[in-house]
Amino acid sequence: MGDARYALATDGLLQLEPDGAWRKILGGGGGQLTDRDVSALLLASDGRLWVGYFDRGLDILSATGGKVEHMENEHVFCVNRIVEDTRQGAVAVATANGLVIFDRDGHEKQVLGREAGLIADHVTDVALYGGGMALATPAGITFLDKSGAHSIYAFQGLVNNHVYALGASGDKLVAGTLGGLSLLAGGEVRRNLNTATSGLKHNWITALAEVGNEWLVGTYGAGIMRLTADGSITPTDATRTGVVINPTAMAADGRLVLAGTLGQGLMVGDANGTRWKTVSAGLPSLNVTALAIHNGIVYVGTENGLVNISEDKL
């Protein structure tokens, strides 16, 4: 630009000095995230932002934007979901190597895996259910409550063992699997839905978002469908052939419904998920992998970093 020469690096903007040295003029600092491949987000009740990575553990950013705390070990590595349990003052982190429980200050307290009664070490999603939690795994669903751990899988009626997404409302639980949807009540399967028995356009269910007394269902290849209160599956404006919704990449707050796609940007729906548009401008990547909404700010995690957007602009 003019007589100056600049270079964009992964950690900032550099300028070439007359002596031939490169000097950083923008970027870096104490707020730098550890990695760019974001896989999970949580805005905790204390205002801190938890950022999980595909293969680098997780960061915790303070509400005031201070130093980033980074956790990474053999269990806190490949993060799939982060859920706050305000009842217990804890944060549950679902990883490929178990369920890791942190206290509200971000200290690791417990690691749960098969030896603790989980049906598998790999936990793909977490939902607060009853007095405890429901955990999605590639081998079925494990329920954790005061009585301990107990699991269900295809033998007990699940439509498919590989569970990708969970949605809880009262004593009802919706499980999105590789083979369709299972609707549960009281911890037992009441009904299964797939392409052969319902209006589902694709059996692989990747994400769920509650809107009123209905659920919006993200699929791997057919966009977003609607699960009505009576258990019917109907299409939406976002039911589109070839559109992949990334695992657990949906969020709703009563004003908007958001869905992250594989390579097609951010899908934005109105409060009920009736009208939809797709946003791509300003995103660091069109592969949107994690979402969170807090106090009018939308946090969008991608495979190439994190961006926040005012909800009003969407």
Image (tube, rainbow, N blue to C red):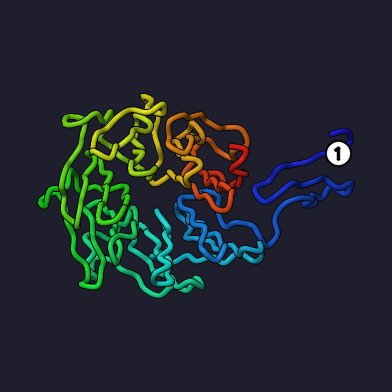
Q: Is residue 268 left or right of residue 125?
A: right
Query: In the picture, which quadrant includes the N terminus?
Result: top right
Q: Residues within 10 Å of mark 1 (few under 14, many from 20)?
A: few
Of residues 187 and 143, the one nearer the viewer is: 187
In the rendered image, which quarter is residue 34 located in?
A: bottom right
Picture coordinates of residue 3, whole percent (x, y): 89, 36
Furthest-left residue in view? Answer: 155
Picture coordinates of residue 282, whole percent (x, y): 63, 36
Picture coordinates of residue 297, whole percent (x, y): 59, 48
Of residues 44 and 61, the one nearer the viewer is: 44
Instruction: Name the residue located 88 percent from the left edge and 33 percent from the top edge.
Output: 2
Q: Is residue 169 left or right of residue 41?
A: left
In the rendered image, which quarter is residue 48 located in?
A: bottom right
Q: Which residue is mark 1?
A: 4
Give amino acid for label 1.
Answer: Ala
Instruction: Name the residue located 24 percent from the left edge and 41 percent from the top edge.
Output: 181
Instruction: Name the residue located 29 percent from the left edge and 37 percent from the top edge.
Output: 228
Q: Is residue 73 left or right of residue 69?
A: left
Query: In the picture, which quadrant includes the C terminus?
Result: top right
Instruction: Name the residue located 17 percent from the left edge and 29 percent from the top edge.
Output: 196
